[in-house]
Structures are given as structure tokens and as C-alpha cells.
Image (cartoon, rainbow, N blue to C red):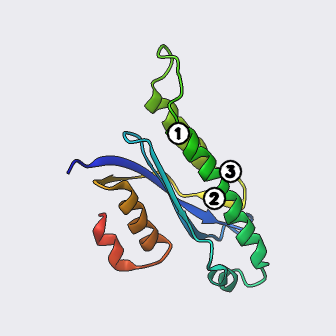
Amino acid sequence: MERTACQYALVRFMPYVNTGEFVNAGVLLWAPRSRYLGYKLLQDKSRRITEFFEYLDPSIFCESMRVQANEFARVKRLVSEDLSYDPRTKSEVDWRDDVFQELIRPRETIICYSEQRMVLSENPQGTLERLYEYYVGRKIEAKSNFI
């Protein structure tokens, strides 16, 4: 099976921007060749977050993840559509790569991203699951499956 280059970034929840403390709360993965934009977010384990940020109202985390999931779903639909483009300016792949870069660009908000990372994958969706298990689920054995 052919391997394809994928870009990914960790989704980080950082409720107190001034301290810089964060928790990995998801993974965003982009496979340009297949136009696959996948994401997986921690949405049902607010206890882990509130144990780390003990004075945080759990609804802040839950709402942040809900809003982020909605935005990712919207962008996922956008990059999977066959949109017309001007071949004199950019190719489809370049245009869609710009969308990924815009999603992960640095901001001072409650949701931020790690630096862009790369991985070769035969199955981007499976790779997304393994990355999530390793970085968010903290299952160390998952690392050997993609590195």
C-alpha cells in the first residue's frame, strides 16, 4: 500500500493564556493528496481537565470543544468540495494547504495548536486514531504504530 505524507498538529486547551499551561485535547490531521482532513477531540472527559485546572468551570472546556468540533466540521466540508479555482494563481492542493496553515496559526486564545508535524501514513484515519491515543489518551504503546 502506498504511503502518503500527512501534516498534523495537536489541539491544545489553554484556559489561562498568561501561564502557558495546556492540556493536549485533540489532533488535527491533513492529508493533502486525498483531501482528508480528520480530527479527534477530547469531549467527554472534562474530569481530566478539571483535575489539572482545578478552579475551571467544566462547562468552559465542554463548550470550547463543541465550538472547535463545529469549526473543524465546517472546514472539513469546505476542503472536500470540488471548488473551482484559478490555475494561474494556485493549485487546489496549495489552496487547501493554506487552509490547514490558517487553522493552526498561533493565536492567543483558549484553543491553540502545536507546531506542524509530519507523518507518513498508509491510512490517514487510522493514523489519526493512533496519534490521538498517544498524545491525548497517553497510551505509550500507540507511538510504535506511527513512528
Seen from the viewer's position, the closer of residues 91 and 53 is 91
Identify the residue at horizontal 59%, vertical 45% (top origin): 75
Comparing labels 3 and 2, the label whose residue is closer to the camera: 2
Q: Which residue is depicted at the point 67% across and 86% down?
A: 51
Q: Position of residue 46 (x, y in %)?
A: 66, 79
Which residue appears at 63% of the width and 58% of the height?
69
* Amino acid type of the residue tagged 2 in the rendering: Ala
x, y (%) of residue 112?
63, 58
Indicate the amino acid at tag 1: Val
Q: Tell me which corner region of the image, top left, top right, bottom left or bottom right, holds residue 123.
A: bottom left
Which circle's residue, 3 or 2, is located before the other in the chain? 2
Q: Which residue is mark 3?
A: 107
Horizontal and vertical percent position of residue 140: 37, 78
> Callout 3: helix, strand or loop?
loop
Front-lying residue, 101 or 126: 126
- Which label's residue is closer to the chain start, 1 or 2? 2
Q: Which residue is mark 2?
A: 69
- Distance of mark 1 from mark 2, alpha carbons? 15 Å
Q: Residues within 10 Å of mark 3 (few under 14, many from 20)?
A: few
| Viewer-nearest residue: 74 or 116 | 74
Q: Residue furthest top?
A: 88
Q: What residue is pinned by disc 1?
A: 79
